[in-house]
Amino acid sequence: MSHKMGRAGLNILVVFVIIALFSPFLYTVDPSKTGEMENILCRPSRDFWFGTDDLARDIYSQVIYGSRVSLSIGFLAGILAITVGSMIGLLAGFYGGKTEEVLMRIVDFFMMLPVLPLMIVLATVLGRGMWNIILVISIVNWPTTARVVRSQVLSIKERAFVEASRCIGSSNSLLIFAEILPNVLPIIFAQAVLMVTWAIYSESVLSFLGLGDPTIISWGMMLHFAFESGAMIKAPWWVIPPITCIVAVILGFTFLGTAMSDILRPGYRETRDL
Amino acid sequence: MALLDVENLKIYYFIRDGVVKAVDDVSLSVDKDETWGVVGESGCGKTTMVFAFMRFVAPPGRIVGGKIFFDGKDILQISNEEMRLLRGKGISMVFQSAQNALNPVLTIGKQITEVILEHESLIKKKAWERAKRQLELMGIGSERVNSYPHELSGGMKQRVMIAIATVCTPKLLILDEPVTGLDVVVQRQLLIFINSLRAKVHLPIVFITHDLSVVAETCDRIAVMYAGKIVEMADISELYKNPMHPYSQALIGSYPSITGEKKELKSIPGYPPRLIDPPAGCRFYPRCPYSVNVCRDEEPILKEKDGHRVACHLIK
């Protein structure tokens, strides 16, 4: 199986996942430990590979540690949003009628809410913990998935094989999960990738705006501190690593998502050899 | 008692323009060792009728009258769950257009085992083995269990459909236009296959088709439908030799014969009636070459004659 874009995306993500998993072995000093006075805002050097911030904390260690926070928030929030969204979409699309009406109106309600203010309000109300950030991001993101999945289910449930399957005694749950779901999976995967990307991005935004958990260092939080300190221009080494990481991870997911939706389509392997 | 007993079945579609009498007062009874062919033009209600056997009439259609007894049970009365369990295990159906009736993203093995697991408490491995055996029985190598539908030919897909429909050994199999859309060579193979299957598993079949030559190969008895009604029922050879109803005669006259003399093929003039307001009296009379006054006013009922049951005023 060769999908160049997919492989590139996968490689990027594998690197970041490894970094996140092994971060305790990779960072050189405790990322939240403040350093000596003379080490404030050091340029990258042998001691501080990426330099230091205004509290003389090692940027390299922060970036490594932040990968763990950013990725886990991204994955968890993305998975939560995609699971809820897919379930609602499947049920609404399959049952139709009143069920659909009620579920989709709820979806509409959530879609109508302005995303950024909602996230800010929720984050303020719920407090600044990591799980709250995950919850906030999921609440904002599940409706799109529900919509996309529902519209796909609507078209698939009318296909002959669903009726044929009903004809040999399949129950509704079998129809939904064994017949329709596999047909929707490529879309769900594409959505999942979008969701995870969006979650990582949202986490950065929330943290940057100061709504993240200040005791946990994430890439967004690093940008927040840099911005707050007013040293963004003076100390580019402080902002470039987290920004690069965010962009790289999002790019990796996007590549992978494109590849996934191609590969999961049966017949893909045959047709691409033609 | 017959395996399937249909009494005065009426299925109407309630649409904006009025009521479409798709199946009107049809009675049929299928015995345990019989293969029935149901023939008729497109839109004469064949498929609607057999869908009712599975209790599959979707709005705006509604079963407005009649009874369907299967194995002694009135299937219009039983609960939804009972009906669901009956499908596939009691009555099974192979759909028109097998090309679309297989799930494109599941392997055929998965699709066969799904049915088994739905109806029988088997462990997955056993079900999988049974799926393989079933495929072999259908003349498809068991190594194809992991194939996806798009990797199979049209005839193979159709056989997989039959495999799925028969894997739980139903008591009655309905084949809805099983060979339509396949080329004649594959059609022939499939018919030979269906015949051999019948010999092997003794399965009563209701065979829906608009192609008379197809039923000639496979069926014992035949019902000719026209505009929502059964106009003639007879043994297959009887019907071919001696069609009594003018419509049956016209239908048979419109098919070429391989061995007989060359003759001009006759088409039936006119079109089937709109079922929203079918002609009063005999529904065939506007196209019937022998129609007389009584045909226009009075609806003929099915009468026994020489082993046929015919609905025609001319049959005394």
Image (cartoon, rainbow, N blue to C red):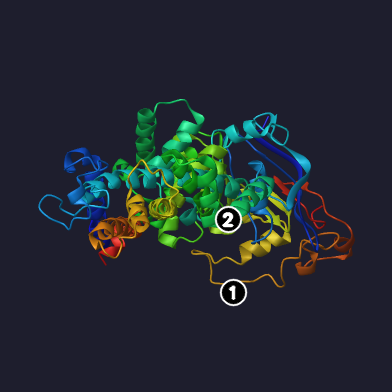
Foreground residue among B134 and B232: B134
Question: According to the image, label 1 marks what residue?
Answer: B264
Residue at the disc numbered 2? A111
Q: In the rendered view, tell whether residue B184 sits above or below residue A173.
A: below
Separation of disc 1 and disc 2 at Cα? 68 Å
The chain that hosts pointer 1 is B
- Residue A177 coordinates in the image, percent (x, y): 49, 41
Nearer to the camera, B238 or A131: A131
Q: Residue at position x 45%, y 57% from top?
A: B187
Give B59 or B257, whichever is nearer the viewer: B59
Q: Secondary structure at mark 2?
A: helix
Do the residues indicated by labels 1 and 2 lie within the same chain of the protein? no
Whole-percent x, y for residue B208 in the image:
59, 51
Quarter of the image with the C terminus of chain A in it: bottom left
Density class for disc 1 (Cα within 10 Å; few <14, some 14-19, many ≥20) is: few
Vertical side of B29 occupied by A207: above or below: below
Dividing the picture into quadrants, the one containing residue B109 is top left
Of tags 1 and 2, which is closer to the observer?
2
